Image (spheres, rainbow, N blue to C red):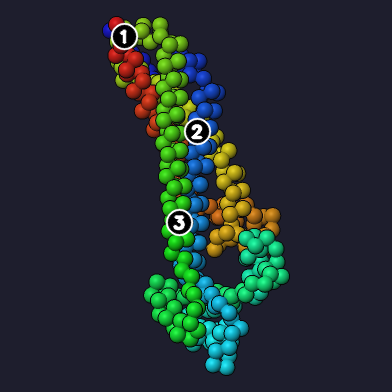
Amino acid sequence: MPPTLRPQRADDLGLRRALSDRLLPLLVAAMIFLAALATAGAEAAAGLAQHWQIGASSMIMVQVPSPEAPVQGASRADIVARALADSPGVASARRLPPAEIAALLQPWLGEDPARLSLPLPALFEVHLPDAAAGIGTLADRLAQAAPGTLVERNGVWLSRLTDLVRSIQACATLALVVVGFVATAVVAVATRAGLSARRVSIEIVHGLGATDSMIAGQFAARVTALALAGAALGIVLALPVLLGLAHLAAPFLSAGLPPPMTDDALPASLLASLPPSLWGALAALPAIAALIGWFTAQTTVRVWLARLP
């Protein structure tokens, strides 16, 4: 009766020597690190875009040319301010002071606009609860109160922002696909190297009756364990980077880190700053790495064994 292998109790093929527990985990860790950064980049772009879209879609800018020109005993700017205050669809309206307007124009004009002989318009920052339904009515009201008043819509910028976010997410998806292909290639090369190193032993036990599934199972178990170890290392290396980026991005989001923070509260606040979807993606990466390792090792070994004489 031919001897049988015990793949789950002993290393019959000497795979601990054939498949190094140093190089493959390090390569998998590098792949997982890049995958975590790509996933976090896509999540951050989507979160920032959603935050900015909410603010931009509810805010419009009202521009009043010749604001000090008199109309019916009052300046055009005062008439527009009263019209905004009396409009039921306006949540708030604020006239930008000259210093703020000058700061907005300085990058383009190159000097203090107040020193130029240019008639600067008055600008109002207006917030609407329902911008889509209220912009048209408000624009008509302001045009009647002060002809020539302009209402700037943010539709073009929102469209460009949406396109930018989609491009970033597409790039992140492409990066994940490339990382997956590279990880598959790395596992395949490592498995073939292990097969070559233990070729004689494999041919002997195969000739004595060991099945393809038994041999492939030993390789797959070893590669899966190494892939899991490397993936865990990659997550550990990526987590401080992601927490640091989350801390930097917190001021740009609606829910930033609450100041002041004590040293004891800082780690918990940073952990809470990562969205749940990102935590789920990070938790799924080791499982995906293990699945890639198991499937690639199984396929590589079975194809190699099928070519034996």
Pick whichever of labels 2 and 1 is earlier in the sequence. Answer: 2
Q: Is residue 144 visible?
A: yes
Q: Nearer the viewer, residue 117 or 296?
A: 117
Tag 2 and tag 3, C-beta contact below 8 Å: no
From the top left corner, tell me how far across and down residue 110 is, in percent: 68, 60
Element class at badge 3: helix
Q: Which mark is residue 31?
A: 2
**Secondary structure beneath disc 1?**
loop
Residue 308 disc label: 1
Q: Amino acid at mark 3?
A: Arg
- Residue drawn at (58%, 38%) of the image: 237
- Residue 203 appears at what percent x and percent y? 36, 7
Amino acid type at mark 1: Leu
Is the residue 268 above or below the residue 83 in the image? above
x%, y% of residue 285? 45, 39
Pick the quarter of the image with the N terminus. Answer: top left
